[in-house]
Amino acid sequence: MSTEKNNPVDHKMIKELLDEKKSKMKLSLAACASCSLCAESCFMFNIYDQKPEYMPSYKVIKSLGVLYRKQGKVSRQTLEKMGDLVWKNCVLCGRCYCAVGIDIPEMLAFTRMICRSQGVDGVYPHNLGAPPAECEALGSEN
Amino acid sequence: MVKSEIKSIEEIVDMIAGYKKVLNVGCAGCASVCLAGGQREVKQLNTKLQFHFKSNNISTTVDEYMVERQCETQFVESLKGRIEKYDAVISMACGAGVQYVAEHFPEIPIFPALNTLFIGVNKEIGHYEERCQSCGDCVLGLTGGICPVTMCAKSLFNGPCGGPQKGGKCEVSMDIDCAWVAIYERLKKQGRLDNIHKIYETRAWKSQGQGTLTLKEYQ
């Protein structure tokens, strides 16, 4: 189901995937009241000095929100930035609490699925998980 | 986390023999962390399977999909609307994940690509050691953080037996440390050797039979 990393982004595929859950996801995105309760429940937000890019609402709005707004017509660079948001800034622990009942983990998992469809993956651990020789070539972030 | 390792390609090929459309479902949880069933491993397995099918003129196709955690209802349900198009599914999750997917989609045969091994720790990437057998009656507080169920060859609660060898090795094998020698040394460092002088009653190993846990707040 995925396109390889170096292929052009398949906007049609992204649009089809977005359409699978369009009504629920768009409603969820519209319902966000920016109350930041989800941020309070996110341990990543709390341990990373409460930086906005770790807020669950931020992660969703800046990834899935952008995908819906642009109807899937995003560049690979944009997708990779989204990949950083939904993988590096989130472990999908499911702790995020929303006062209006938005299912944030579902939205993040959905975004990950869309990224994977275009060859943008989260690899555990980031840049590692490959045998040592490959790690040296790639460069480690740790 | 749960540690697993991938089965041989021969075993996997054998399991899906005769099916025409197969979906290989990875797991981004524990299986991914121990490099057994994550995104990378799904692609690697699919490459091997496709090579096998092409080399043997077999018309089976195999697609890929990732589930964040196959042991979690919310994420398993993301397979709805997708899994029904396939005759069979390979699951690259641990045994719990395989069973959960099978339970949610009982009409479709689900085949495990992994052997689930143990609950263990990551000593370093690619090197995992068992630490827990989920006996359901943890005594780690008494034994200085060393599990006699997992680390003792006889799972003794009132060790050691009469067998420790020179160098603190187990009589079962000189490659195995005697857990109770290690427990003794640990408790000695902590000034808690009194623990080892007590005799503990036989424990009820609650892990026999399927376990369930419902938190009080969710009853």
Image (spheres, coloured by chain):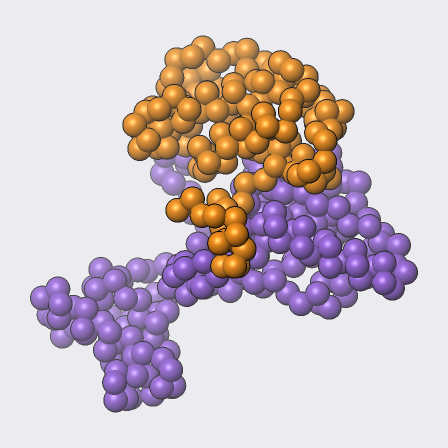
Chain colours: A orange, B purple
Q: Quadrant of residue B193?
A: bottom left
In the displayed structure, A89 sits above or below B11; it is: above
**What's the residue at 13%, 70% (across, down)?**
B188
Residue B37: horizontal and vertical position, in percent? 59, 53
Relative image position of residue B60 (x, y in whole percent): 84, 54
Residue B18, given in percent of the width and then of the height, sits at 85, 59
Q: Residue at x 46, y 15 (%)?
A: A100
Q: How many marks?
A: 0
Between residues B178 and A77, which one lies in front from this camera angle?
Answer: A77
Instruction: Give the quarter of the image for residue B146.
Output: bottom left
Q: Quadrant of the C terminus of chain B?
A: top left
Query: Is A79 drawn above or below residue B92 in the view shown?
Result: above
For the question of whether residue B103 can be seen, the reply is no
| Quadrant of the drawing holding the N terminus of chain B | bottom left
Is residue A69 or residue B77 the one in the foreground? A69
Residue at 42 percent of width and 24 percent of height: A53
Side (left or right) of A14 relative to B171: right
- Which image quadrant for residue A9? top right
- Percent from the top left, x then y, of residue B202? 29, 71
